[in-house]
């Protein structure tokens, strides 16, 4: 007796209500035939707010970089090829728009708008202002807290964002300097006056991690020296505190004003897949 292959899990039609979750991109295709099937791309959609990290294949060995000040020029050049952003997802007139509060690359001149539809077990995205096709796949996420927030650093005024879905989280922080208008980040780095300025251009964090019994641990980041580190979020007198490090790797506590909260912020750790 033959056994038929199991059918792909049916996905609901895309809407602001059905999209929350973790999405992995498997394909980016352009009209001229170019494709990207190898970059790591994860999009975490929380209630209303989202975070997105995109890293090209072929990362160098960053084991010698324990902080921003340790990054070499060749490592900075590769890091400048990354993409990532956070902000709010809106749906108007049939188009989804990923509005960007934080952008790892200098602000694009085009809005990020696209049409979404389901083909089998794949969600397809077609760009509106820029012609592209992307394929997205929903990743399994343990049931649990679901919330997201916009943040503002109380001391520096830098924008931030955080989202949690069950046992996963993402956190973002904008750089603390302006980038020259009309340039890509790679061009900014290449034209930097010195390596210190090039490091400043790179210093924008978009990280993804897991909520574990050992804490909130970063697993992938636009800043490789953040990987393996604990974020240790804590609510104190209405502020969200997170563990961070300065350019020389010295630890400090960053204090965030919560400027926009969607859902209830639960900061418990996970043990055996269950929130404690």
Image (cartoon, rainbow, N blue to C red):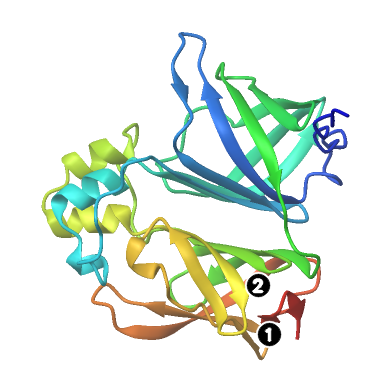
The image's mark for residue 185 is none
Residue at the limit of the structure toward the bottom, as seen here: 237
Q: Is residue 110 above or below residue 201?
A: above
Q: Quadrant of residue 214?
A: bottom right
Report which quarter residue 113 is drawn in: top right
| Depicted 249 relative to depicted 45: above or below | below
Q: Which mark is residue 238?
A: 1
Foreground of the two, 200 or 24: 24
Mark 1 → mark 2, Cα distance in angstroms: 8 Å
Disc 1, disc 2: CB below 8 Å?
yes
Residue, far front: 1
- Name the side, left or right, on which 74 lies relative to 158: left
Against 47, residue 152 (above or below) is below
Residue at 79% of width from left, 35% of height from top?
91
Evaluate whether residue 48 shows in this view. yes
Judge whether residue 261 can be spotted in this image: no
Outermost top residue: 32
Residue marked by disc 2: 258
Across and down, in percent, residue 264 comes to 80, 73
Residue at 88%, 29% in the rendered image = 1
* Image location of residue 82, percent across then percent down: 39, 44
Identify the residue at horizontal 77%, vertical 32% (top origin).
121
Q: Dot 1: within a 10 Å radius of its alpha carbon, few (fewer than 14), some, or many (20 or more) residues?
A: few
| Quarter of the image where one finds residue 119 | top right
């Amino acid at each position: 007796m033959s056994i038929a292959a199991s059918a792909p899990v049916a996905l609901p039609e895309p809407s602001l209500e059905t999209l929350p979750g973790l999405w992995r991109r498997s394909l980016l295709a352009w009209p001229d035939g170019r494709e990207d099937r190898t970059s790591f791309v994860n999009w975490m959609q929380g209630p209303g707010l989202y975070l997105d990290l995109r890293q090209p294949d072929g990362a160098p060995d960053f084991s010698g970089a324990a902080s921003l000040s340790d990054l070499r020029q060749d490592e900075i050049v590769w890091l400048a090829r990354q993409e990532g952003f956070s902000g709010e997802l809106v749906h108007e007139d049939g188009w989804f728009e990923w509005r960007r509060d934080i952008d790892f690359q200098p602000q694009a001149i085009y809005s990020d708008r696209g049409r979404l539809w389901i083909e089998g077990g794949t969600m397809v995205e077609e760009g509106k202002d820029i012609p592209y096709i992307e394929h997205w796949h929903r990743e399994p996420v343990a049931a649990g807290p679901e919330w997201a927030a916009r943040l503002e650093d109380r001391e520096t005024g830098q924008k931030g964002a955080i989202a949690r879905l069950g046992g996963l989280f993402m956190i973002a922080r904008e750089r603390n300097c302006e980038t020259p208008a009309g340039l890509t980040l790679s061009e900014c780095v290449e034209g930097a006056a010195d390596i210190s300025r090039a490091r400043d251009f790179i210093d924008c964090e978009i990280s993804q991690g897991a909520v574990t019994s050992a804490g909130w641990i970063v697993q992938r980041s636009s800043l490789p020296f953040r990987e393996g580190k604990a974020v240790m979020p804590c609510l104190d007198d209405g502020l969200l505190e997170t563990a961070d490090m300065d350019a020389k790797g010295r630890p400090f506590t960053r204090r965030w004003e919560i400027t926009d909260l969607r859902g209830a912020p639960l900061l418990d750790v996970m043990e055996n897949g269950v929130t404690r």
